[in-house]
Image (cartoon, grey):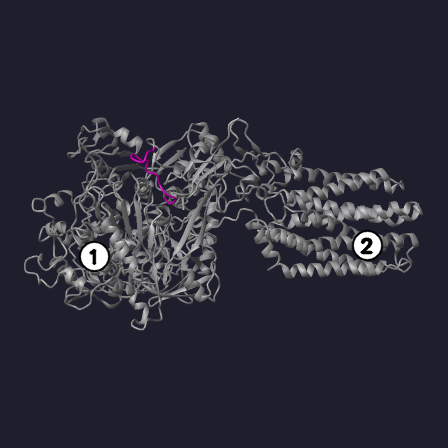
Amino acid sequence: MGNLIEQAKNYAMSRRSFLGLTAGTLATVSLSGCGLTKVSNQQAEELAKKEGKWITAACWHNCGGRCMNKAYVVDGVVVRQKTDDTHPDTPDFPQQRGCARGRSQRQQVFGADRIKYPMKRKNWAPGGGKKELRGKDEWVRISWDEALDSVSGEIKRIREKYGNSSIFVTGGSEMPRTLGLYGGHSTHWGTTSWGSWRWGPAKFGMQEGYFEHSINDRLDLRNSQLVVLWGGNPAWSAGGNPTYNYLQAKKAGAKFIIIDPIYTDTAETLEAQWVPIHPGTDHAMLLGMAHTLLKDDAPPTNPLIDWDFLYRCTVGFDADHMPQGADPKDNLKDYVLGTFDGLPKTPEWAAEICGIEPNTIRDIALQIAKTKRVALFTAWAASRINNSDSWPQMFMSFGAMTGHMGQPGRMTGVSCHFGSGNGGPGLVKPGGNGLPAIKNPVTDSINDNEMWEAILSGKYTAGYNKKKDINIQLIYHGYSSVLQTRSAMNKGIEAHRKVEFVVCHSHFLTTNAKYADIILPATTEWEREGGFGTGNREILIHYTRVTPPLFETKHDQWMAIEIGKRLGLKAEDIYPISEKQQVFNQLAGATVIKEDGSGMETLLTITAADIAEMGIQGKPQQGRITLKEFRDKGMYQVERKTGDKFGYIGYEKFRQNPAANPLKTESGKLEIHSKALAALIKNYGFTEIKPFPSYNKATEGYEDTFKDWKAKVKGEYPLQVVNPHYFRRSHGIFDNIPQLREAFPNPVFVSAKDAGERGIKTGDTVLLKSRHGKTLRTAQVTQRLMPGVVGLPHGAWVDMDEKNGVDKAGADNILTGPIATGQGIGGWNTCNIQVEKWKGAALIPDVKWPQRII
Amino acid sequence: MFSEEWPLMMFTLLSQLAVGTYIILLFIRFSLMKNDVHLSVRLTNPGLKVVGPIMALALVLSVFHLGTPLGAYRAVLNLASSWLSREILTAGGFFVFWFLSYSTFKQGKPGVALGIVTALLGLAAVFSNASVHAMSVRPAWMDVNTYLAFYGTTFAMGCVGATSLVAFELKGSAVPAPVGKILKTVAIIAGTAVVVPLIYTPVFVSTLNAGSTAAHESAAMISGSYLMPLVIRALLSLAGAVLLYSVLKNPQSILPVNQALGALMLIAAGEFIGRYVFYATAVSVFTGRTLI
Amino acid sequence: MTQLGFHYDMSTCVGCRVCQIACKDKNNLKVGVLYRQVYDMESGVYPNPRIDHLSMGCNHCADPKCVKNCPTGALYKREQDGIVLHDKNKCIGCKLCLWSCPYGVPQYKEDEGIIGKCDLCADLLAKGEEPACVTACITRSLHVGEIETLRKQYGNIADVKGLPGSEMTRPSLCITTKKK
C-alpha cells in the first residue's frame, strides 16, 4: 500500500509536468477543481467571459433516478454543469433535476484518476506471472498494440488449453459478441438489486418493479389516504424526483407508515409513523397482520378483508379456493390460523421474530384494512434477504386480503428505483439499436453467490440435484463491478488470484481493475456518440458527445472489434453497424404516447438532410417533433396533468373482470398458492419453499444472531448489518470523486444502544467482523437505528490492508458470505456481524486518501 | 486549524509586550524626571530603544497571518467600521510615534507630549486588537474578558519587561531610592495586571455557561480539557508577580538581573499559555456538523 | 433599496447536498472550500428520533458583520439588491470575515491567499436566471427572491435550533420549519 501511495505521488508529479507541456492539446479537459487542474484561475476567468454551448450530457448510472444533465462547454472546456431547465417547474410537470452525483459528473469524466492508457501489472506474464500479486502489484503503461495482443493471446491460449467455458465474462455487452463468435464463454447470473422480486413474482402474478410495474402512477398516488413504504428510502436511493412525488401525495393529505430498521430521511420528511423492524423478518410481521385481520374481520359490522376480491381474483387463500390439483391444506388462511401445524401466526408469534410490539402489528394491520385507499409499497431492500422467496408472495397476499389493488389510490407492489411511486409503461421510448443478437454457445452460467467458490473449487450448482464441473482460467471484466458488488468479496479476491488471466475495461482503478492483470482504458458516455436515458416513464433523454475521447481511452465496442480481429474474426460480424447508426436507429424508432392515450406514435421527424448530415443509413420520417428540437432540448417529457389520459392503475382491468383479463399465471389469477413458484425455486437447486407463503428463516438472518434462540442468548455475531444505498455513490460508481467524498464521509451507523454497550463514540474507528471478513469504518452513533442493526453504506471500494487482511474502506461485501438460496438471491441485508473499537491506527477521512492515480 | 493562528497569536503577545514596556518605561522616566533627569534618561533610553524592534517583529508576524501579504497596506481602508483597520492604524501609529519619540529621547529631550501620544496610540492599539476579537462571533471572545486579558497582558508583560530592562541598566549597582519607590509601584501594577484577569475567570466561565450553545462549549473546554493549562498559567503568572514583588519590595537593595529576568520568563510563559487557551477555546456561534 | 435573500424549507429538505455540489460546480471550488454547505442535526431518542438538515449559503445579511469588520472593504453590500459581494482584488486574506460570520459562510482559499463566498450567483441573476443551488434542489426547498416578498409568502422565521440568533446580523433568510 505504501508503495502504491508513493507511486501515486510520483505519477501525480509526472502527470502535472506532462500536462504543463501539452496544455494546448489538452484544452478539452475541464476546469475541474479537484481532478486535473489544467486551467489556471486566470484562464478560467477568461473562459467565463466567452460564450459557450450547453450540451445534454449523459448521466448513465444505475441509481434510481433519471435526470437531466447538461455540460457547458467553452472552447472545448467543460466549465460547469446544470440540470433540467427545459420548461417551467410544476409538481405535475416537474423538471428532471439531478442529484449531487450527477452534478459531479464532470469531476468523474475529467478525474485525475482516470485510467488514461492501457496498463499492465508489472509482474504479469502470459499464464499469470506472479498471480498472488494481483491487487498489490505495480502498474506499467503499455501500448494499445501490446495490450490487445496480450489479451487476445491469452484468450486464444486459454481457450485452446481449457475450452471456451474456462473464459468467464462479467458485464458489458461488447465482449460477449466477440467471444460468442469465438465459441462462447461462461457467464454468471443473480437477482442483484431485486432480491426475491427478480424471478419468482411473475409466477404468482405480480411485476418485479423495474421493467414493469404493479403500482399506479404518481398522479394517482395523490388519491391514496395512506402510503405504506415497506423498506425503501427514496430520499437516499432514488435521486431525482421520487421524493418530490411522494411529497405531493403528502401535500394531498396522505399519511405515511414506514417499516424499516432505519429511521430514514424519507420517514422524517414524510412525517411517517416509523416502525423499526429486524432485517429480514418482514414476512413474520405480515403473517401477524394477516392473523389480526382474520381474527377481527366481522362483516358487515367490522369488515377488514376484501373477500370479494380474494374469491374473484386470487387462488389459494382458503381451502375452498384452491387451484386445481393442490392440497387443500396448503392454503394461507389455515397456515396463518395454525389449523394444521398447531402454530397460529399471531402478532405475539410475529413479535418474537420481528421485534415489533404485538399491538403495533395489530394497529398497522387495522390501519391498512380500515383505510379506503391505501398504497402498499415495498422496495427491493426487504427482499435482498436469503431464503426470502415467499416474501413477495406474502406481500401480494396481504394486498389482496385488503383489496388495495386495481383502483384509484389503491395499489400493492414494488415501488423502487426510477419507478418509485410512479408505475406504468413508458410514455416515451427509444427504438432498438438494430444490432443483431449473437448467440453464446456455452451454457455454463453460475449464480453470483457461487461464482467465486466455483472458480476455487471447480464445481457449481446447475439445477435441482445437479452439480457441474467447471474450470475457469480467464476472468473478463467488461462494464461491470462484480468483485465489488457481489457477495463474498474475500473469496472473490482469492479467485482472482487463482486464475491464469484477468482483464478489465475500466475508467478508474476500481475493484475489478485493481485485481486485474491488464486494464483497458474505456471512454465514458461523455466521450461517445450519444445515447438515451430511459426508465422514468414520462421522459426520454437524448445525450450527445461532450468531449472527444481523453488520452488513449477507447470505446468498448472498438476493443471488442480489435480483439476479435486478432482472434481471426471479422469486424463486421461483431459490429455490423456503426455506433452512429446504432444511435440513429434508436432515434428513428422512438415512440411517444398519442395525445388520446390510445397507443404509441412516432416521436421524431427526420429529414433526408438529417440523415445525410449523420452519414448513416435511414429513411426520412414524420413524427411529433423535429430531430433538431429533440437534440437541442435533450429531452422529451410527456406533459402530465390531473385527469389526463396517461395515468396508470395496476390490475385495473383484471380487477374489473379477471376472466376476460387473465394474468400470466397458471390460473390466470393472483396465486396465493403457486405450484409454479415452488417448482421454479426448487429447480434452481439451492433451497425449497412451499407453494403458499410460509415464513422461511433466513440463513444468517436475525434468528442466526443467537446462539440459543429459545433462551435468547446472542452468538458470536450478534448484530445484523444492512447496506443502505448512499448519496456518495451509485452502487460503486462515484466513490472516488473528491467533492462527493467531502460531502459524504461514509461512516458506519451504529445505534446508540449498541455503541454504548461497546464503548463506541462518534468518530471512533471501529472494526466490523462477520463470518466472512473484516472491515474498518468511522462510527457515527445514532438514535435513528434499531438497536441490533448496523448500517454500512453500500458500495465503498475495498482497500485491503494486505498485512492483516482487514479492509479499510467499509466495503459491504467483505462482510457477506457465499450463500446461495432460492432463486439465487443476493441476500445482502442478511449478514451477522460484531462491531468493536479498533485498537490499531485510526482511519483518516476518505477525502484525504490519495487518489488512485496510475 | 489552530496552527494557522500562530503568527496572529505571537503578534498579539509581542505587540502587547511592546506597548506595555513602553508605557511602564515612560512611567518610570516621567516619574524620575522630577528628581534626576539624567538618571531617568540613562535608565529608560536603552529599554525604550528595544520596544521598537519588538513591535516591528510583531507587525512582521501579523503580515504572515495574511494570505496576501503584499496587500497589507489595504488593511486600513475601512476605518469607518473595522476594528482591524483601526488596529493596523493604531499599531502602525504606535510604531511610527515610537520612532519619533525615541529620536527625541535620544537627543536627551524630555519628549513628554510625544511620549504620551505614543502611549495613547499603544493603548488604542491594544483596545482595537481586543475589539477585533470581541466583534467576532465567538462568544468566548465577545466578553469584557477579552479586554481584561489583553490589557492584563500589556501591563503584566510591560512591568516585567520594563523592570528587566532597567535592571540591565543598573548593572547590579544599588537601586537609587526614587527608582526603588517607582519600581515598587511597578511591581504592584504587575500584580494587579496578573490578578485581575485571573479573578475574573470564574465570572467569565459562569457568564459563558449562561449563554448560547457555543458559549457552553467554550465554558466546557475552559473548565474541562483546558483547565490544567489554565491552572499552570495562573501559577506561573502568580509566581512571576510574587518573584517580581519580592525583588522590588525592598527599594534600597540591589536589583538582581537574573531574578527580574526570571519574573519576565514566568509571566511570559503564563501569558503565552493563557493566550493559547484563549484561541483554542473560542467556539463559533455556528456549530454545524455533518452526520450522514 | 431592495434586499434579495433565500427561502429554505426545512420541512422538505432531505439533506441530499445537491445544492452544495451544484454550488461547488458553479464556483469551481476545490475540496475544503464550500460556499454552500448542508449540515445535519439529530435529536430525540430511539424510537422517537429526529433528523433535521440545514442548507447554508450566504444570507446576505441586512447588518453583515463580515462587511463591518472587513479591514479593506473587499466585502461590501451591493446597493441595488443588498447582495454581500467580495472584491478579490481588495481582499488580503486576513480571515477576519471567517471570525465574523455567524453562519460560517466565508471560506479561505489557501492557494489564492484570499477568501471567497456565495455571491447569490450574481452573474446568473444578471442573466435572469436563479442561483445554482436553487435550481438544483430536488425537493424544491430553496427559493431566491426579494426577501420581504419571500417573508410574506413563507413567513418570517430565521431562528431555528442549530442557528445563531438572527439579531446578530439580521440575515436575509426565511425558513419554513417542520410542524412537529
Q: Are marks 1 and 2 in contact (CB under 8 Å)?
A: no
Q: CA distance from mark 1 to mark 2?
A: 89 Å
According to the image, label 1 marks what residue?
A: A296
Residue type pointed to by label 1: Asp
Residue A609 location in percent, x, y? 23, 26
Give yes or no for residue A91 being in the magenta stretch. Answer: yes
Give yes or no for residue A834 being in the magenta stretch. Answer: no
Work out whether residue A26 or residue A637 is closer to the camera in this orientation and state it. Answer: A637
Magenta range is A89-101
Residue B164 location in percent, x, y? 82, 55
Q: Both on one chain, marks 1 and 2? A: no
Residue type pointed to by label 2: Ile
Report the side of A138 relative to B282 (left or right).
left
Toward which corner of the image does residue C155 lie, by quadrant? top left
Given the current orientation, which residue lies at the most extreme front position?
A301
Under tag 1, what secondary structure?
helix
Residue A33 location in percent, x, y? 46, 43
* Residue located at (26% from left, 37% from top): A539
Work out whether residue A380 or residue A335 is closer to the camera in this orientation and state it. Answer: A335
Q: Please give the chain letter of the residue carrying mark 1.
A: A
According to the image, label 2 marks what residue?
A: B188
Magenta stretch, overall SS: loop
